[in-house]
Image: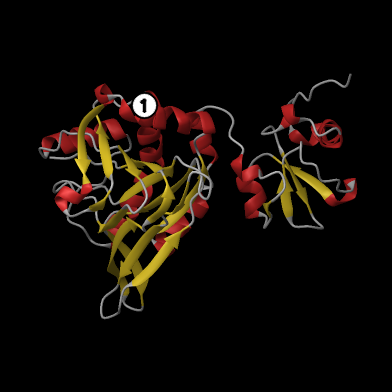
Amino acid sequence: MPAKLKLVHPPQFDEDARWAAVSRRDASADGAFWSCVRTTGVYCRPSCAGRPKRENVFFVETRAEAETAGFRPCKRCRPDRFVAGSLSKRIDDVDWKRAKAGLDEQGWAPLGRLLSDDDCAALIDGYDDDERYRSTVMMRRHGFGEGEYRYFADPAPPLVSMLRTGLYEKLAPIANEWLAALKENRPAFPATHEAYRRRCAMAGQNRPTPLILKYGPGDYNRLHQDLYGGEIFPIQTAVLLSEPERDFSGGEFVMTEQTPRRQSRAIVAPMEKGFAIAFAVNDRPMTGARGAYRVKMRHGVSEIRHGKRYCLGVIFHDAA
């Protein structure tokens, strides 16, 4: 029986072991490295059923490295759907350079898969546990659309808290660049979310804002901005917990971009189960001929045609 792959020291010494793992389609090696196939332009898991020739393959440590080199995820083994390691490592492994470029240029960016199927199921299964939540909002009652959502109580479940803390630390430098570009007369965002929550509390915003949104057939969310007081962190994230076209259809995540003296632009961000996106809460800078100017963003969800759609929203400022 062939030995399991064990990575040791510098990756250049592991080429033979890695190729052996690819040759035997060793699922235990998935996530340890990725195979880039020059002839097809895709990158794969070691367990992929494809049979590339050795001379056409090289190996990389991370998916971000493969995508930066111009390779796209294999549609057969779907390496972009693979989840392994701690949540903090998954957040670290996001291609943050690419995410920053997307946020700066488009006002939103995909972050890849952050939650496993088990993670998603645990959050959905806990939706009816009243002790987890501080409040429930029926959207029709407030003219927000159709459907409902629930705000987590403090402290939120560990998975949600870790997402909020870890993502904030990656997004805070981008938010500070936006702050400077828009010439906002306010202090920079602190490096940690704990420090930022203290700032929110000083502004009278003490209630946590992470939430789960639940939609059924005919439900939708009108275009809006998640503003809960004067203290606003300009970027938020969402993680889809349901599988499109299996658990539900419709329910596209929609954004609009309003620029001065122009009609609004509509954007549809593709989402998959367990995948996260980051997007502008309200204002973001856009570079023009005379420097940066202010662009307003709104977001919502189109009508659900069938099934149930659950989504986790991670907002970094607290509510008054």
Please tell me which residue lies in front, 52 or 94. Answer: 52
Q: Quadrant of residue 103?
A: bottom left
Residue located at (32% from left, 64% from top): 285
Residue located at (33% from left, 65% from top): 256
The percent coordinates of residue 213 (x first, y second) are 32, 42
Q: Is 178 located above or below residue 213 in the figure?
A: below
**Is 92 left, or right, of 131 in this rendering?**
right
Please tell me which residue lies in front, 139 or 175. Answer: 139
**Is 104 left, or right, of 94 in this rendering?**
left
Label 1: which secondary element: helix
Residue located at (54% from left, 47% from top): 95
Q: Residues within 10 Å of mark 1 (few under 14, many from 20)?
A: few
The percent coordinates of residue 64 (x first, y second) are 60, 47
Question: Which residue corresponds to mark 1?
Answer: 126
Q: Amino acid at mark 1?
A: Gly
**Is 196 left, or right, of 82 in this rendering?**
left
The percent coordinates of residue 222 (x first, y second) are 27, 58
Q: Is 6 located above or below residue 44 in the figure?
A: above
Q: Quadrant of residue 284?
A: bottom left
